[in-house]
Amino acid sequence: MEANAEGMLSPYRVLDLTNERGFLSGRLLGDLGADVIKIERPEGDPGRRLGPFYHDTPVPEKSLYWMGFNTNKRGITLDIQTADGREIFKKLCRTADIVIESFDPGYLDKLGLGYATLSEVNPGIVMASITGFGQSGPYRDYKAPDIVLWALSGLGYVTGDPDRPPISPGYPISYFFSAIQAVIGTLIALYGRSTTGRGQYVDAVTLLGLAWATGPEVQGLWPTNNQIVKRTGRIWPRPQVGAGGEVNYINVPLIYPCQDGAVKFFPFVEPGMLPSTNGLTQWVVQEGMASETLKNVDWSTWNWQTVTQSTVDEIVQSFSRFFMQHNKAELWEGAQNKGIQLYPVFTPKDMLAFPQLSIRQYWQEVEHPELGTSVVYPGAFTRLAEGSCKIRCRAPLIGEHNEDIYVGELGLSKEELARLKQAGVI
Amino acid sequence: MERRPFEGVNILDFTWTGTGPFSLNPLAFYGATIIKVESRERPDALRSLGPFKDGIAAPEQSYYFAYCQMGKRYNITLNMSHPRGKELARRLVAWADIVADSYATGTLEKWGLDYDSLKKIKPDIIMLRSCMHGHTGPLAGHHGQGFILTALSGVDALLSWPDRAPAGAFGALTDFIAPQFNTICLIAALDYRRRTGKGQYIDQSQHEAAMQLITPLILDYTVNQRDYTSNCNRLDYAAPHGIYRCRGDDRWCAVAVFTDEEWESFCKVIGNPALASDPKYSTLLSRKQHEDELDTIVEAWTATRSPEDVMGLMQASGVAAGVVADARDQAGDPQLAHYNFFEEREHPVIGKIPFYHGPCFRLSETPYEIGRATMIGEHNEFVYTELLGIPDEEWASLMAEGVI
C-alpha cells in the first residue's frame, strides 16, 4: 500500500468494526487518506457473504460488495467476543483516533468495549455508532433492515406507482444515509478535539438521515395544510388552482419507456427551456410520429394552468410512441445534438459508456494480484487540488495485515501470533 | 455551553437550490458563520419552488427554500454585474475561510471568482464547487436538476418494478446524497488547513458522488458484464421481504424475514405455527421458490390489521416490520419525537415553520444550533457596515448605485 501522506486525513487512524451497514464510513475516511484498519471476525466479515460476486463465485474473498466498500483499508482479524481479543482491541485503541461500529445498540457495552471504556483507554478517541433507530428511544431495539427504515422514514409512502404497493430500492441504500452522516459527525468531533483535547461519541441514526431526505413537499404540507402527499410513480402531477382555490392536477409523465429501458423528459415552457421542448417536438414531427395536437402546439403560449388533460394526453402519446422507436443511446445522442434536456435512466452499462466520466478519469483500474487481474472501479468521490481522493489499494483479504499490525506495530512475537490464531482470537 | 467547533470559521455562500446549502448546513449547526449572497435580479431559484405558505408563490414563502436553509446564515444582496459588486465580493472573500458555489462552470469565472483569483486574495482559501457534472470535461457548463441526477446516478433504476418503466425517485433524492460528501470534504479541508496552513479546492461532480452508493452494481457490470435490473421490494437473502397491504385506505407495512428463527416467530405471530415446518416454506430457498404464494399468505394476515398493529406484533416477536409512514405518521412517530426530529422555528413572513431539523446524528458533548431561512438582503446593513466596516457614505452610495 502506498503512503497515505498525501491525503487530507493522513495523520489519523481509524478502527473499523462495521458490518455492511457501515462499510462506506471507513472507506470515505480512507479515500481522504486516513489509515483505516478493518477488523473482521477470524472467519471473515459477514458482509463478505453479500453478492454480487466476482465471476459469480460466492466465496468470501470474491464478494464485490465487500470489494467495493473496503478499498483503502488494511484488514486484520480479531474476535472481540474473547477476553484476549478485547484486550488487544483496547491496545489498538491507544493509537487510534476514531472507532466506527454498526452493531446493534448496546452490543459493545455488553462486551465492555463501549465508549465509556474506550475513552478511559484513550480520552481523545472519537467513536461513532451506526444504527437504524439510534442508541435510545422506543424503537431502539427494533429490527432495522433497510426496507423497514425506508418505510418508516416517509420515503416509502411517496415512492412507487399508485396502482401497486409502495416500493423500496431493489438494492438497499438506507444505511448509506447514516454511514455518511457518521463520518460528518466524526470529523466535527475530531475538529473539536483540536481545541478541547477530548473525543466524543457520535450516534448516527439512519431513520433521521432518511426522514430528512423525505423533504419539504411531504413534511411541509401536512402540518400546515393537512395535506398528505401520495406516490405518483413516473407521473409528475402539475397543479392547476381554480378560481375558488381548489386544486386540480394534470398528469404528465416524467419517465417514459424506450426500446431498451427508459428516459426522462419534461416539456418545460420557461423561456430558458423552450429550445429543449421545441427541439423534441420538431424531432418527433420530423420522424412522422406527431399527432395533430403536437404538430400544432405553440409551446411559447402554453399554460399549465389552463391546459386540459386530454390535450396533454395527445401530446404524451406522441412522445411515448416516438421514444419506443429508439434506444437510450440514440435518444441521448440526438438530445445532445439538438439541445434537448432529455436523460436516459442510467444503469451501470450506460454509466461506463458516458464520455464525461471517462474524460474526467472517474473510472479507476485497481490491481487484484490474488485474482491475477485488475478491476475497473468508480474512483474518487471528489476532485481535490491539495491531497488526493482516490483508491490506493484494493479491499483486504481476510487477515491480510495481521502480521503488519500485530507484530510490526503492537510488538507481538510471531509465536504469540500463532498461539492467538490457534486459539481462534485472530 | 461548550464552544462549538466551527466558531470563527467564515463561509461565503454563493450556493443555491438544494445541494449547495445542504453541504454547508452542518457547519452552521456547529458554529460556522455563513453569509449567503443573493441579488434581487437573481434570487435563489428555490424561492420560486413550492410548496408555499398559503399556496402563494412569493419569494419569502417557499417551504422548499426554507427547508434547505436550516443552518443559520446572514443574507446579503450583491449585484455581481456591477463593477463595484465585484470589488465588494473580493472584500468578502478576504473575510472568508471557505467560499462555496453550486453553479455550473461559467458563473463564478464571469464574476472573477475562480479558484486562482480567490487564492490571490487569500492564499489559504478553501473553495467548494459542486455542480452536476463537475468543473472539467465537455459537460462542465451544463446546468443540473435534481430529477436529472436521480436518472444519471442510477437511483431511478433502483426504484422500479421489473415489468415496467421505473417509478423513479420521489423528488430530488440525490440532492440529499451528494451534499453529504461535500460536508465531509469541507471539514477535512479545515482540519488539513489547521495542520498544514494549506487551502483546498474541491471540485464535486454530484453525479460522481451519487454513483458511489451503487459501487457493487457497477462492479457487477465491469467484472461480470451483468447490467442491473431492479426487483424492488424483494431481496435475494430474505423472504418474505416486501411491503404489504394493511387495513385502511392506502395503508401498508414493510415486513422482512431473514433467518429461519425469524420465520418461526413470524408464523407464531400470524397464528399459524404449523406453517413454519411446512416444507414449502421451511427454508430460505424454499421460501424464495414459493415467494408469490408466500406473499399472498402474508398479505391475507396484514390486510385485516392496521400497519401499527403489524409492526408492533412483529417487532415484539423479533421480526422486522415498519409502518409505511405518511406525513401524518411521521409527525406522530415516537422515535422521531425522541430525537426531537421536528423542531419549530419562527420566520418573519411564514410564521411558524414546524418542520425544521438539526443534524442526522447526535454528538455526546457538542450541542447544535438551528437557524431559519433568511430573507433577501435581510442582513445587508450588519454585514456591510459592521462586519466589513464600510463607512456610512460609501454604504449609501452602494445602495444608490444599485450595487447592493
Image (cartoon, coloured by chain):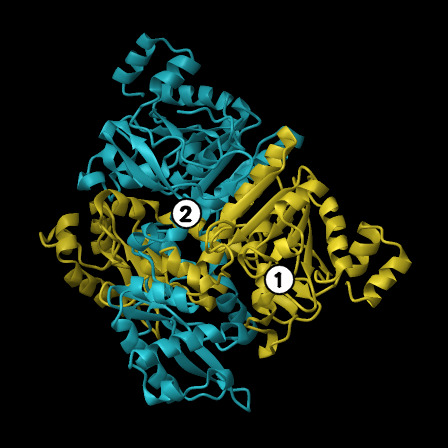
Q: Is residue B8 visible?
A: no
Q: Secondary structure at mark 2?
A: helix
Location of mark 2 (residue): A359
Please say if A32 is above or below B395: above
Closer to the camera in the image, A136 or A354: A354
Amino acid type at mark 1? Glu
Question: Residue lying farthest bottom?
Answer: A243
Location of mark 1 (residue): B344
Please say if A185 is above or below A97: below
* Residue B30 spot, x, y in % from top left: 63, 45
Closer to the camera in the image, A333 or A101: A333
Closer to the camera in the image, B212 or A59: B212
Kindly report which numbered mark, 1 or 2, lies closer to the viewer in this rendering: 2
Please say if B400 is above or below B360: below
Which residue shows up at 44% across the image and 48% down it?
Answer: B209
Q: Quadrant of residue A329?
A: bottom left
Q: Residues within 10 Å of mark 1 (few under 14, many from 20)?
A: some
Q: Which chain is cyan?
A: A
Q: Secondary structure at mark 1?
A: strand
Per the model, the C-alpha gap separating discs 1 and 2 is 46 Å
Please say if A309 is above or below A424: below
Q: Is residue B171 visible?
A: yes
* Figure disc tally: 2
